[in-house]
Image (tube, rainbow, N blue to C red):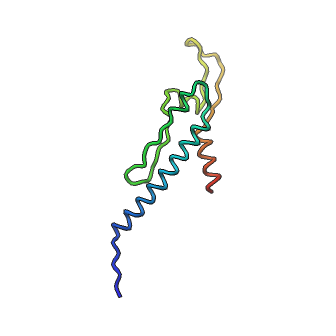
């Protein structure tokens, strides 16, 4: 008995499964990130977007598009009217926290 496998069909099924899994994970991460985002006006929280997965289903991107998102996430010096105040706003890394939460739950 001989069995011939259609490798391209197997690869398509694997790609579709990987794409579905990555999409689900990206959407969950996006939702967690929004929930973990610090809120003042709500603009930062509502600026999140999930992009992807890419054609090979190897990457998905969760991004906060507010222009100041990086400064809130990573922390920054406090400057008032062009003068450095010598103070620092600590980081509030909500994206990192969201990833860590998911990793802890999913091993």
Q: Is residue 53 above or below residue 12?
A: above
Q: Position of residue 3 (x, y in %)?
A: 35, 81
- Pick out the residue farthest to the bottom: 1
Residue appearing at x 41%, y 59% in the figure? 16
Q: Position of residue 44 (x, y in %)?
A: 54, 30
Q: Is residue 107 above or below residue 7?
A: above
Looking at the image, how many numbered discs can be counted on the residues? 0
Side (left or right) of 87 relative to 95: right
Q: Is residue 4 above or below residue 58?
A: below
Which quadrant of the structure image shows residue 92?
A: top right
Residue appearing at x 35%, y 67% in the figure? 9
Side (left or right) of 77 relative to 53: right
Q: Position of residue 87 (x, y in %)?
A: 66, 20
Q: Please identify the quadrant where the N terminus is shown.
A: bottom left
- Pick out the residue farthest to the top: 81
Q: Position of residue 5 (x, y in %)?
A: 35, 75
């Amino acid at each position: 008995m001989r069995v011939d496998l259609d490798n391209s069909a197997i690869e398509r099924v694997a790609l579709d499964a990987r794409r579905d899994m990555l999409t689900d994970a990206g959407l969950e991460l996006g939702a967690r990130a929004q929930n973990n985002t610090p809120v003042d006006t709500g603009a930062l929280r509502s600026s999140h977007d999930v992009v992807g997965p890419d054609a090979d289903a190897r990457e998905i991107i969760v991004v906060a598009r507010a222009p100041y998102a990086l400064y809130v996430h990573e922390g920054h010096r406090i400057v008032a009217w062009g003068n450095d105040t010598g103070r620092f706003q600590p980081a509030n890394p909500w994206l990192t926290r969201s990833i860590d939460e998911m990793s802890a739950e999913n091993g």
